[in-house]
């Protein structure tokens, strides 16, 4: 079934003055904001510091450097942020340590749980009142946390709820890290349901999990040691405790627009215990709208994280409207950078594609996407379409299942591995693109 003559809906963007235009531009320029306003950052926190900086800071408090290692063990391995509970630290020093190292950064405003309890969305208030969200999801073999990297977002993608808010400020390294430590506390307290329902996608198949680097479904990635009645495999520390196993920078914000702090957070995640969380870089996914210089910087870091590009359209005509930053670095430049990421790191990359009815889901676009990806090579990329999640006030809807099926079939027929992703958390507005942190839900 070829549907080249199917109708073409384009994004219509409403400006602040109430007028609308078909392209997200004002005075002919895209409404993009790369630089966060100069605002005060939160007080320095333990998680902002490298091990050397922690040792230095501990010495300044009149303690020997080895205390930094003990503190790291408490914070990163045991999720303890209250020095009163750190019984191997001299009691008369604990208050000073609490004040110097552990200022409260994230205040929980509320949390929403899906009916079956395998997904929790957290709303956090930061020190300056800014609100951000993170989403914790249990799958069969992993526990994934979707973290925010900025308060709001400056990329202005019209189909994304966060994009409509504008950018308030960058989050600090510790604010990013704390989302994970707090989630680990919640898991340790048994507040995330112990088993996950299988995710069935809109095509009635096992869906790809968020942050699944290879695009394998959980079933496909099953290690086979998941005996009946046992806890899901792959989510436990050697000590038998469960914690976040995968982190995806797919919450609020554009991670590559807050490069330094995001990279520092990644160091805390991947540094070996007790210096950091000791996570594998492949279990950390950085998703970007396509900031090409940032992608090139990331591929040359010593930490080969999993990389995802939000493409959403293979043709510049449409992508300019859906992803305003495309007017700066176009689809081909973004795909080239993704391909170079693969060549440099050896890590297969993901292409994200939100399927929007009559906007970007045409069969010819699937063919064009396949052509562009295959022109660079084979086996380097995996396409992860996701049916659009509804956002407030948006007129757009997800593609019809049969249209999505044809989109996938065409990519697969062209030899491009493609798996529709689940839309976990939709009922709590916790799915991709639905994070608005209004505090109203
Ligand atoms: N700024 C980064 C990461 C945040 S969003 C980026 O753009 O990649 C994570 C993913 O959700 C991106 O692929 C984004 O395009 C997608 N997304 C945004 N709004 C969505 C929506 N309403 N439905 C489905 N996916 C959406």
Image (cartoon, helix red, strand yellow):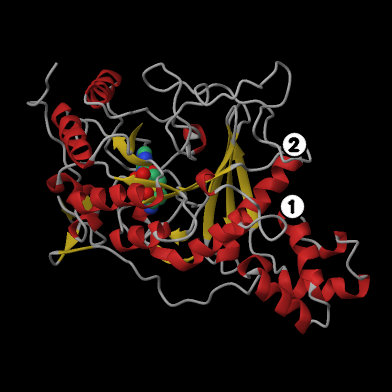
Going from N to C along the chain, the mark reached first, 2 or 1, is: 1
* Residue nearest the observer in this picture, 17 or 101: 101
Which of pointers 2 and 1 indicates the residue nearer the eye?
Answer: 1
At x 36%, y 71%, the residue is: 35
Disc 2 secondary structure class = loop
User: Mark 2 highlights which residue?
Assistant: 190
**Label ID, residue 77:** 1
Q: Is residue 257 left or right of residue 192?
A: left
Ligand 1 shows up in the quarter that is: top left
Q: Is ligand 1 closer than 8 angstroms to the Cβ of mark 1?
A: no
Tell me whether circle 2 and circle 1 mark residues in contact (CB < 8 Å). Answer: no
- Position of the N terminus, as image quadrant, is top left
Q: Position of residue 270 (x, y in %)?
A: 59, 54
Q: Position of residue 176 (x, y in %)?
A: 56, 59
Question: Is 156 located above or below residue 346 in the figure?
Answer: below
Q: Quadrant of residue 126?
A: bottom right
Disc 1 secondary structure class = helix
**Label ID, residue 438:** none
Sort mark 1 into few (<14), some (14-19) or many (20+) by Cα contacts within 10 Å. some
At x 65%, y 47%, the residue is: 183
* Residue nearest the observer in this picture, 66 or 236: 66
Q: Is residue 61 left or right of residue 258?
A: right
Sort mark 2 into few (<14), some (14-19) or many (20+) by Cα contacts within 10 Å. few
* Residue nearest the observer in this picture, 349 or 92: 349
Q: Position of residue 153 (x, y in %)?
A: 39, 59
Question: Is 45 located above or below residue 354 in the figure?
Answer: below
Question: Is 195 located above or below residue 267 in the figure?
Answer: above
Q: Position of residue 115 (x, y in %)?
A: 60, 27
Q: Can residue 391 be seen?
A: no
Q: Quadrant of residue 83?
A: bottom right
């Amino acid at each position: 079934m070829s549907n080249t003559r199917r109708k073409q809906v384009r994004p219509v963007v409403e400006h602040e003055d109430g007028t609308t235009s078909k392209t997200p531009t004002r005075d002919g320029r895209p409404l993009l904001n790369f630089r966060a306003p100069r605002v005060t950052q939160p007080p320095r926190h333990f998680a902002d510091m490298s091990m050397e900086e922690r040792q230095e800071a501990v010495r300044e408090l009149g303690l020997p450097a080895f205390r930094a290692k003990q503190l790291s063990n408490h914070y990163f391995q045991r999720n303890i942020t209250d020095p009163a509970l750190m019984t191997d630290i001299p009691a008369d020093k604990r208050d000073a340590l609490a004040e110097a190292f552990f200022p409260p950064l994230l205040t929980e405003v509320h949390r929403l749980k899906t009916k079956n309890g395998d997904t929790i969305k957290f709303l956090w208030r930061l020190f300056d009142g800014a609100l951000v969200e993170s989403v914790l999801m249990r799958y069969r073999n992993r526990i994934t946390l979707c973290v925010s990297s900025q308060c709001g977002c400056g990329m202005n993608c019209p189909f994304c709820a966060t994009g409509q808010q504008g950018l308030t400020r960058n989050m600090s390294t510790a604010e990013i890290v704390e989302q994970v430590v707090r989630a680990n506390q919640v898991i340790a307290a048994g507040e995330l349901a112990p088993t996950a329902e299988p995710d069935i996608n809109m095509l009635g198949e096992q869906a790809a999990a968020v942050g699944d680097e290879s695009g394998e479904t959980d079933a496909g990635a099953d290690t086979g040691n998941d005996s009946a009645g046992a806890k899901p495999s792959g989510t436990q520390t050697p000590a038998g405790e469960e914690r976040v196993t995968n982190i995806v920078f797919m919450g609020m914000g554009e991670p590559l627009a807050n490069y330094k702090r995001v990279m520092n957070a990644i160091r805390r995640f991947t540094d070996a215990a007790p210096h950091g969380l000791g996570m594998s870089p492949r279990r950390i996914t950085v998703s970007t709208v396509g900031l090409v210089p940032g992608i090139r910087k990331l591929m040359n870091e010593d930490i080969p994280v999993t990389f995802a590009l939000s493409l959403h359209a293979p043709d510049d005509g449409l992508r300019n409207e859906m992803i305003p930053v495309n007017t700066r670095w176009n689809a081909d430049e973004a795909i080239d950078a993704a391909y170079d990421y693969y060549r440099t790191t050896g890590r297969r990359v993901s292409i994200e594609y939100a399927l929007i009815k009559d906007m970007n889901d045409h069969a010819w676009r699937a063919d064009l996407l396949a052509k562009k990806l295959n022109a660079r090579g084979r086996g380097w990329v995996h396409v992860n379409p996701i049916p659009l999640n509804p956002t407030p006030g948006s007129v757009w809807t997800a593609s019809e299942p049969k249209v999505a099926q044809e989109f996938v079939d065409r990519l697969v027929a062209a030899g491009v591995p493609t798996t529709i992703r689940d839309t976990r958390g939709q009922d709590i507005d916790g799915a991709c693109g639905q994070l608005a942190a209004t505090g109203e839900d």
